[in-house]
Amino acid sequence: MKTLYFYLFAIVTMFMSYSALAQQGTLVGTVLDESGMPMYGTNVVQKGTNNGTITDFDGKYSLKLPSGQQTVEFSFIGMQTQEILVDIVAGETTTVNIELKADAVTLDDVVVIGYGRRQKRDVTGAISSINTDDIGDDVLPSLESAMQGRAAGVQVTTSNGLAGSSINVKVRGTNSISAGSQPLYVIDGIPVTDGDFSPGNMGAGFNALSDINPNDIESIQILKDAAAASIYGSRGANGVVLITTKKGKAGKTKFNVNYYGGVVTETNRIDLLNAEQHLALRDSAAVFAGNQPENDDYVIYQPTTGQAITRGMADSIAAAGGTDWLDQVLQQGFIQEASLSASGGGEKTTFYMGMTYTDQEGFIVGNEYERISGRINVDNKASDKVNIGANMSINYSTNKRVPTGDAGGLGLAQQRLPYLPIYNDDGTYYDPYNNPLWQLENWTFTAKTFRSISGVYFEYNILDNLSFRSELGVDFMSLNEDEFSFRNIEDTGSVSSAWDRRTSVFNYTTNNYFTYSENIGEHNVIDLTLGHSYQRAHTKGVGLNGWDFPSDNLTNPGSVDPSNMSGYGYETSYAFNSFFFRANYKLYEKYLAGFSIRTDGSSRFGAQNRYGWFPAISAGWIITEEDFMQNTEFVSFLKLRASYGLTGNANIDDYAHLGFFSPTGGYNGNSAIIPSTLPNELLGWEKSIMLDVNVDYGFFNNRLSGSLTYYNKQSSDLLLQVTIPSSSGYDKIWQNVGSLSNYGIEFDITSHNIQGDFKWTTNFNIAWNHNEVTDLNGLPPDAFDNGLGGDARVVVGYPVGIAYLVEWAGVQSEDGTLIRYNTDGTPVLDNSGQPVKYDVEAGTELYYDINGNLMTYENPTGDFYGDNRKPFGRPFPIVVGGITNTINYKGFDFSFLFSYQYGNTIYDDQAKRQIGDWSDLAQRTEILDYWSPYNTDTDVPGLNQYDNYVNSTRWLYEASFLRLKNISFGYSFPKNICSKLNISRLRIYVSGTNLWTLTNYPGWDPEVLRNLNPSNPDSNVSFAAPSFATPQSKSIIFGVQLSF
Amino acid sequence: MLDYFYRHITKQNKMKNIILPLFILALISMSSCEKILETEHNDRIPNQEAISSTRDIQLILNGAYDGLQSGCVLGGNLVIYADLLADDAIIGNDQRLNKFGKYEIYNMITSPQIGEIACFWSTAYSCINRSNYVIDAIDSGDVYDAEFNANKDRMKGEALFIRAICHFELVRFFALPYDVNQKGSNVQLGIPYRTAPTKDYEELDMARNTVEDVYENIIQDLSEAISLMNMGGLVSSSQWASAMAANAYLARVYFQIGDYANAAYYANEVISSQIYELDENPENVFKLSGNQISPEVIFQLVNIETDNSNSLIDNYSRSKNPLFQTVSELYSLYDENDLRRALINKFYVLYYIKKYDQAIISGVSQPLNRVIIRLAEMHLIRAEANLLANGGNLADAYESYNALKQRAMGDNFVPETVALNEFLGKVREERRKELCFEGDRYHNLKRLQMPLRNGVAWNSNDPIFKIPADEISGNSLMVQNP
């Protein structure tokens, strides 16, 4: 009986399926993307069933469907899913071609987190994400330009406009006083070398990150809070910048060819007096002093070598126009870049390949930067269980650096008197040692860098939801600097000198971790990561200096007599060994929780403090998933999240904890070793405990979206040099005793103002940070005097690097008298009990003493500097941020990015010489407002009452600015023309950087840093006090982008 | 959690359940290996590895000499400071009176922030620390290689010598002078006398020893140094310390504190050893360069082209537009045939000091050695000490006086008979003529309790250097000078 039923059943089903079969039609078609390229791997599914297929390489699909009206769904990650209603006729083939559009909603993006990826909506940490899509078609000359103004709470400053110059990136404020405050940079999982390895001194820093080709970057994630960054443990306190390079996509190989060329100049030039004005100033000064103006024979300039300049000679030079030194040293430079990339692959193997050549002639005469980079990223599905891949990159750059700042070049040109000639009568340079043009011609410095950042990985899917990944990455940098300074032919004692310096950094990392993901029941999702990481880096530097060459044709330092040689050598290394664990939990798609912990050990920490633990917890609530939110129409996404955890800063010297002896020159040819530092085996990382509370919102179907964050970061155990009695033979020891706090608010909003044919999107971000030093273990402000001028100090209750100055009180407008005061505010009394007074000439500089009473430099209250300095100004801005606008209409695109900073002050260290020291230096035009009987109400002292080089608030300027960082206008040719040419896209564009700036800062550029290596602790303190600064660069380029 | 994990895996695939524990085992064993975080040091030596052989100890001792050679210590600054505070020299070029330096020292208004003074303090104490390392290494018995026994006495003697003379120079500038009339009860604050090397940053605070204590320690160290260096075979030397140098210094120390019997004794030790004799031409003593020697020099610090540190040249030599000049009163003290008068360079109406002019060979200036102590001073000490001590040897005193006169007058020497009541005055005048601009006058005026420059009292607080700021803030037991 059973068998009968079985057969009956079989026949009926067969019949049914036969009829079903008989009642099937076929749906075929091609799926393309917006640019007309076929989409391989698109899901084509009969809605509500398991009946589906995927498109092939040419985007073609074929699906059998039952006859009648059917709904078919086309979907692909990152694209908007499309549904079509189609009538299927039995036995017939219907064709439907689909064009998929990119998903406008970005909240479903996948972001890279440390050791893994996660859906953005499921992330419980604070991560700012910058994708190539966000940047759109903006041209990126460097890595930092991708980050500036695009991520709330991340302040990026380049020190000047020269290629390869150092950058300073602060994530949520400065986090350290004496240790490095830069974030950790990780490329494809490998922490890379950054900082300034240039041993030479050209007055400006060098940046190891400049070797990274921005064209290869797919996305940048900046981990800002403890939940996101504590997976990097003792290196996460300053934030982590995760850079992911482009990967291939399966499908036909897509090519991209880009070229741009343009000009670059300086953003601003300060106004200096010309020769005539300056000489007239000298005359005025003489007259006001009651003297005769200088006669023709008076020597007004004595060079180091050569003939002196008399007043008569200067007058004739001025009559002929004088010398505009800035004009001689600055030029319009030409920049160009050509790049080619290809990406593609098949089912099993995908690849991305790119090559870029950059050639930049800087805006300073003699400066040139050339770089060629190549990259290949390959991913292969070796089997069902095994994925392997490799990312290889090679860069080679040549940077012809020029002296700037305190070293000369532009720094010297802005000091040189305008009535001095450039050349002697015989055509040789006048006064070579002080002549910036002679310097630029005879002092060459070429830095050649070879850099390779490469890695391989192996992934094994042990089970469906458990995989193991092992990565090995290497960052190798070899820097070779050739410096040559030619002798001064006028000075018979001078000799040529050559340096050959080589520095190499070999940095390798291996990460090995398990990832496990489990759905427990219907509603619980749990993701676990457990892993180990090991990193080791080794730096070695050596240099050879040779001088006094037998012939001018020899320039190699090895070709001199051995007694004219000297050199140096050093080596340093560090290692990190870590274990980490992370758990993420999601309930009902709306409740999120996260926990991570890492233990880090490093060779940099003392033996008694080698390993540390860095835990963090976080939670999130996607409010819009709740039932009570289902009816609110305008709120499309609302998520609340918070995190709390501990991260560390390990940017301390490699051997800070070590007590050691060093070799010295010795005595009478007998070498010696001397005790050099004391050991501190308790020395460890600096700690940051951070609380982060954030709301992510989306309104009107995510047409308006963004986030609002409050964070509070308390940093403690900061490294400070504590004084020990110098009678012990040592005088300082590093200890973890300081603390400071940062707290602030970040806000960003993205608005798709207009959608449709005419698209307009705006993104606005703003961040406010409050930075305050809370404990210095009793160290006075002057303990942080690094001798670099600018008078920046560290004072409890104020931000790091606050200017510590005497307060400027203006200029005495008429002859008068002032009372002399004591430091307690009482007047100094004479024998008869009357206050002591002193005469003050009109035009004299006035200052406020510690109690607000007037004094002069000659008649100070107590000690002028010792008793009267106070903290002033703001080294960090009150708010920082950017605004981006992107407009698309038919083939045209237009976008511009403004970045702004408001509320910070810069101490213009050299303004005090360029407005006042008229007998030695070129002067800024501000000096023309000097006090005189005809101009008594002024802030510029009399020409003969100038107090040399007094550090006061007179030189502390407001440096807020609004800058048009980027503007571009492009046109993409329409599809029909493109397909005729067999290409998928052709765009031409014109783009400009730093074209317009709004600022009250009177110096070169409000975006400036002191010329210091950002890994140098002094750069945390003195960064806002530049010296003979070099401005940023402004450029206009034309370019072509071609894809096929 | 791990349990659940485990069960889950074993459910799925029995083979795979060994992977996870194996991996964890591998990681744990890898991490417990300390070598994983070891780093190499090939340009510096960790403290615990620094001293493992006799040669290592010698290297540290060389480091102590290197410190002594520094301008801040015996390389010349102390001579300059002595002349700023006393009456042999006047300021010839006040541009060289740098603010936050010699300006304040000259005007006797020093503050804890003066860089040069802090350099003196910290470099001298660095030398003391290096010497203490040497002494500690020798006493600890950790080193026992083949060369140890042959060298240990010599090295320890040299280290004790350096330790003593550094403290001696420090106490003479940073503390009130030793009152020779209060022998045994000079309780004014001196300086901390450090006798142990600093190995650790904790517990470094040390109070100031009294001046009496400091001198007691100095004398003890020098006495031990003499016997050790004699045992070690380092009796005299042209570049290093020596037993004779220790004898000479001990004479100087006893003389400073008014213990004239001992001063005469030790000066006599040096003179009667017959190792030294007065150079015929006093100028020769001040032209020594590199390894050149003069029979008169007992202890000098050698300067060579690649390691040259002499801060006196720029401040005394006429060709350098120097800080100092001198006055006609000093010049006229010399008899016109006195060979030493040539050491003062009379230039029209100005008087420059020629003691520190560099020798020039083929147009190249030669490095100039620093002569620290010479036989002439021993004769002066022997002469004056024998006159002042009870039961002093007058014959020795006359012998020394005449020896100096004979060298000074050369061929024009006429033996003098000096009346006893005038003799002390004559010896003191000889001292001034012989040792001018060598850093002696200032300390000598203090010993004799005579006023310093501008009538400042010998025991005034004004010329005493303030203790540097670093020491005050780092050492809770330190007391500043008033």
Image: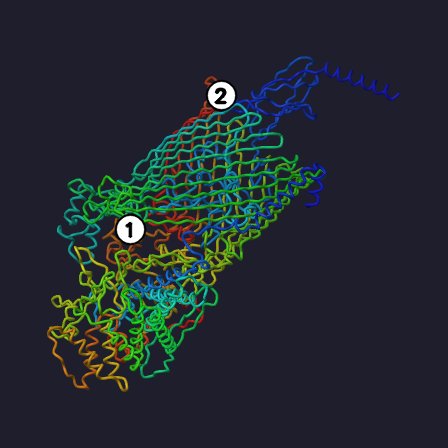
Q: Quadrant of residue B331?
A: bottom left
Do we see residue A616 in this rendering? yes
Coordinates of residue A213 in the picture (x, y in percent): 44, 35
Q: CA distance from mark 1 to mark 2?
A: 58 Å
B150 lies left or right of A242: left
* Viewer-side residue, A949 vs A611: A611
View extreme (right): residue? A1
Q: Which chain is disc 1 placed on?
A: A
Q: Badges 1 and 2: C-beta atoms under 8 Å apart?
A: no
* Viewer-side residue, B200 vs B238: B238
Q: Quadrant of the N terminus of chain A?
A: top right
Q: Quadrant of residue A288?
A: bottom left
Numbered mark located on residue A914 in the image: 1
Query: Is disc 1 placed on a helix, strand or loop?
Result: helix
Name the N-terminal-most of marks 1 and 2: 1
Q: Which chain is disc 2 placed on?
A: A
Specify the amino acid type for callout 1.
Gln
| Crowd tier of the residue under label 2, counting other residues whose Cα lies within 10 Å: few below 14, some 14–19, many 20 or above | some
Coordinates of residue B322 in the picture (x, y in percent): 21, 63
Q: Residue at x 11, y 66 (%)?
A: B348
Numbered mark located on residue A267 in the image: none
Residue A267 against residue B86 in the figure, above or below: above
Residue B90 against residue A125 in the figure, above or below: below
Q: Which residue is mark 2?
A: A975
Q: Quadrant of residue B21?
A: top right
Specify the amino acid type for callout 2.
Lys
Coordinates of residue A705 in the picture (x, y in percent): 56, 38
